[in-house]
Image (spheres, coloured by chain):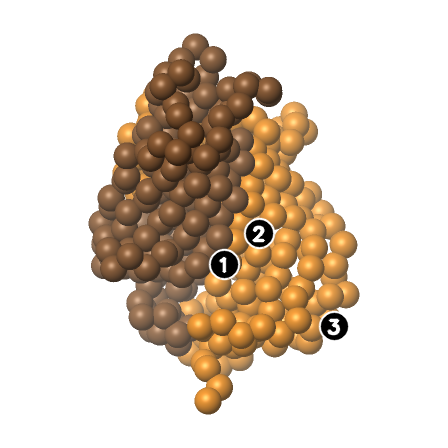
Chain colours: A brown, B orange
Amino acid sequence: MRWDEITEGASIPPVVDEITARRVVQNPGATGDYFPGHWDPDYARRQGQPTIYANSLHVFGLLDRAVTDWAGPDTFVVRRNVRLVSSMYAGETVTVSGTVTGKSEENGRLVELDLALASRSGAVIATAQTTIRIATTA
Amino acid sequence: MTESEDETGYALPIGTLEDARALIGKRTPLRWAPAPVSLGRIQQFCAMTQDGNTSYWEGGVAPPAMLEAWLMPLEWSPWSSTPEPRLPARIPLPGRSMINGGNDTTFHRPVEIGDRLSVEEELLSVSDLKRTRLGEGHFVETLSVFRNQDGDIVAEVRNTLFRFEPGQPS
């Protein structure tokens, strides 16, 4: 993404992802987070959840992916402030959408975005404010 | 603690709100990652998030979302047969379950292959009793400071999890 092409209020291309049970169970292996809500459906139900759900790092990874798919691989995430409203359950198809909310050149080329991760029904799973630094060569 | 929770191998320390608040401000000893940042782990993570970012696959940079993954305790090692949980799972409170609620991370420098990270943690606050869709409990706010092998701060994390007793009282 070229710096002069980034405009406040613009939407970034949404990332749509199918969160199969297989994907959710990849999570403990990939991150080392063996909290049982991420692999044991019985435990998840005892927690009051319908089934197993992705851990926070998977959610953060999808939020970051939406931003870096748009801004490019040299993007540095400066800050990511996430509110986890619900959980990303096995069997859901989710969408990350985002809007550019600010742009500044005071301390490098910084872009601020508002992001939302939602299920197919539209229920919000997580919201985030992310600040990125764009590579100066871009 | 119930038998069924024993089966999962996941038991949280039980205590009172006062027990929890007595820990506020005490910093944990420095804890080192079991292993340096590696391409193998990065590939496992990116295969899960289906992230084709070339800086992760070919550029030696770790996805920022993996930050906590480098410090996850091993399930087993020759020196310890039980994983030693990180601070957020070591707070004595009445609730037998937990779920993450919020995370505010500021990154200062990239994490790269070969880096060996450490973390120091501190309990910042424990809320009064709250009710959410999952049950009644307390919000636990912690600060984690991640450094690399040179002692440079890599990232600072303010995390809020909900420590609760499942079930809605009628």
Q: Nearer the viewer, residue A104 or A16?
A: A104
According to the picture, the residue beneath numbered tag 2 turns out to be B159
Are discs 2 and 3 located on one and the same chain? yes
Residue found at the very far bottom of the displayed protein: B170
Decide: few, some or many residues near mark 3? Use Cα within 10 Å; few <14, some 14-19, many ≥20: few
According to the picture, the residue beneath numbered tag 1 turns out to be B100
Say what amino acid the circle numbered 2 marks: Asn
Say what amino acid the circle numbered 3 marks: Glu
Q: CA distance from mark 2 to mark 1?
A: 8 Å
Answer with the quarter of the image where residue A2 lies: top left
Q: Chain of mark 1?
A: B
Residue at image point 53% right, 74% down: B131
Q: Nearer the viewer, residue A27 or B81?
A: A27
Relative to A74, say whether A112 is above or below.
below
Say what amino acid the circle numbered 1 marks: Asn
Relative to A38, say whether B109 is above or below.
above
Residue at image point 70% right, 67% down: B20
According to the picture, the residue beneath numbered tag 3 turns out to be B18
Q: CA distance from mark 2 to mark 3?
A: 20 Å
Residue at image point 64% right, 31% down: B153
Residue at image point 33% right, 63% down: A52
Q: Where residue A75 appears, x then y in whole percent?
A: 43, 24
Q: Earlier in the sequence, mark 2 or mark 3?
A: 3
Q: Where residue B167 appears, x then y in whole percent?
A: 45, 80
Left or right, A101 with reference to A41 = right
Answer with the quarter of the image where residue B141 lies: bottom right
Decide: few, some or many residues near mark 2? Use Cα within 10 Å; few <14, some 14-19, many ≥20: many
Q: Chain of mark 3?
A: B
Q: Are marks 2 and 1 in contact (CB under 8 Å)?
A: yes
Element type at marker 1? Answer: strand
Q: Earlier in the sequence, mark 2 or mark 1?
A: 1
Element type at marker 3? Answer: helix
